[in-house]
Image (tube, rainbow, N blue to C red):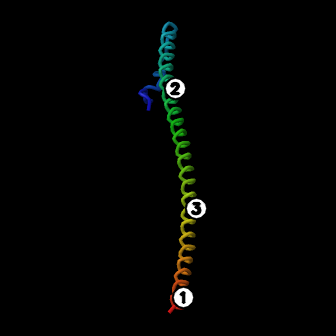
Amino acid sequence: MSDMKLTNEKMLTFTGHEKVGTFKAGEKLMEFGEKQNAANEALAANVNELIKRVCALEDKQLQNEDIMRRIANELAGLKKELDRVRLTEKLNSGAIERLDRAVKLAEGDGK
């Protein structure tokens, strides 16, 4: 967060309701203006800091979405490969069993 942390004191620009004479009005108006400028500066610094943080979070979210999309694609590819391996294993097991039966039948016929 910004070094210019907002506090009630920093945002207080009007400090009194006392009567101000004609000759003091300009001085009081100048004091109010300076305090208002300082409060505006602090507020602007905090708003700008928040904007930077939101932008950084949005960038991070986009990166995370991209990473999740790539992970999802990898998982889909892995599932396809796993299904292919399972099918190959089943087909190979069936072929091995048929060959084994054929060999046993051939041995039985030869005796």
Type of amino acid at the residue the image marks with label 3: Lys
Residue drawn 52% across the image and 83% down it: 103
Vertical arrangement, residue 37 with respect to residue 87, above or below: above
Q: Give me the C-alpha separation between circle 3 and circle 2.
A: 54 Å
Vertical arrangement, residue 73 with respect to residue 9, above or below: below
Compare residues 107 and 29 and report the one nearer the observer.
107
Where is residue 92 drawn, in percent x and y? 55, 73
What element does badge 2 sit on?
helix
Compare residues 41 and 31 and report the one nearer the observer.
41
Mark 1 surroundings: few (<14), some (14-19) or many (≥20) residues within 10 A:
few
Between disc 3 and disc 2, whose residue precedes? 2
Compare residues 104 and 74 and report the one nearer the observer.
104
Mark 3 surroundings: few (<14), some (14-19) or many (≥20) residues within 10 A:
few
Q: In which quadrant of the rendered view does residue 105 lie? A: bottom right
Q: Quadrant of the N terminus?
A: top left
Between disc 1 and disc 2, whose residue precedes? 2
Please give the residue where the numbered disc 1 appears in the rendered image.
Answer: 105
Q: Give me the C-alpha separation between circle 1 and circle 2.
A: 91 Å
Q: Nearer the viewer, mark 3 or mark 1?
A: 1
Residue drawn 52% across the image and 8% down it: 22
What element does badge 3 sit on?
helix
Type of amino acid at the residue the image marks with label 2: Ala
Type of amino acid at the residue the image marks with label 1: Leu
What element does badge 1 sit on?
helix
Where is residue 46 drawn, in percent x and y? 48, 29
Between disc 3 and disc 1, whose residue precedes? 3
Callout 3 touching callout 2 (CB < 8 Å): no
Callout 3 touching callout 1 (CB < 8 Å): no
Which disc is residue 80 wearing?
A: 3
Please give the residue where the numbered disc 2 appears in the rendered image.
Answer: 44
